Image (tube, rainbow, N blue to C red):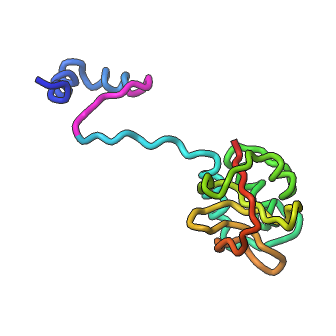
Amino acid sequence: MTALNRVPSLLTRAGTASALTIAAVGGSIVAPGAVASAAPASPGTKALQIAASKKGAAYQWGATGPRRFDCSGLTLYAYKKAGKRLPRTASAQYNKTRHITVSQRRAGDLVFFHSGRTVYHVGIYAGKGKIWHSPKTGDVVRLQKIWTKNVWYGRIS
């Protein structure tokens, strides 16, 4: 008799309450066809979801939400709701991140737009070359393709 074949008889002998106790204390029971639960979402993934939920919110210089945002205000707000603290400006946020390469980027990382050594804009990487950001006066929070190669990437630990 294999271990998988013994599971039903072990549960019958141990009783449902014991199986629930095992689960409550972090134990696991292997059963045929069972799928392990997914790992909890990372702060970057949570921040990305929060930023996306603000789709259509108006741009306002200096605003940090919850109804209006500038670029760094959106990233500050999204990461704060995800449990991480960021400084207020795009350049200060860049200095707070672990700098990564384009090949290391993943959804939830910050994308910093720069001219020379000066960071002037930030968004949250959404995957497939797109970001969620609050672009400029007269615009709204939206998903947009990255339009330049003058970007740096950063990850919040």
* Residue at image location 88% in from the left, 60% down from the top: 117
Taking depth in this image into account, of 146 and 84 the one nearest to the observer is: 146
96 shown above or below 137: above
Is 128 placed left or right of 28 in the picture?
Answer: right
17 shown above or below 56: above
81 shown above or below 136: above
Q: Is residue 42 magenta?
A: no
* Residue at image location 35% in from the left, 28% down from the top: 28
Q: Is residue 27 magenta?
A: yes
Query: Farthest residue toward the top?
Result: 14
Q: How many marks?
A: 0
Task: Choose top left, top right, bottom left or bottom right for residue 57.
Answer: bottom right
Task: Choose top left, top right, bottom left or bottom right for residue 34.
Answer: top left
Task: Choose top left, top right, bottom left or bottom right for residue 132.
Answer: bottom right
Is 85 placed left or right of 35 in the picture?
Answer: right
Q: Which residues are magenta?
A: 23-32
Q: Quadrant of the C terminus?
A: top right
* Residue at image location 60% in from the left, 58% down from the top: 49
Question: Where residue 124 appears, x then y in whole percent?
Answer: 68, 60
Taking depth in this image into account, of 151 and 126 the one nearest to the observer is: 151
Is 157 placed left or right of 87 in the picture?
Answer: left
137 shown above or below 153: below
Principal SS element in the magenta part?
loop
Is 108 placed left or right of 90 in the picture?
Answer: left
Question: Where residue 91 appears, x then y in whole percent?
Answer: 86, 56
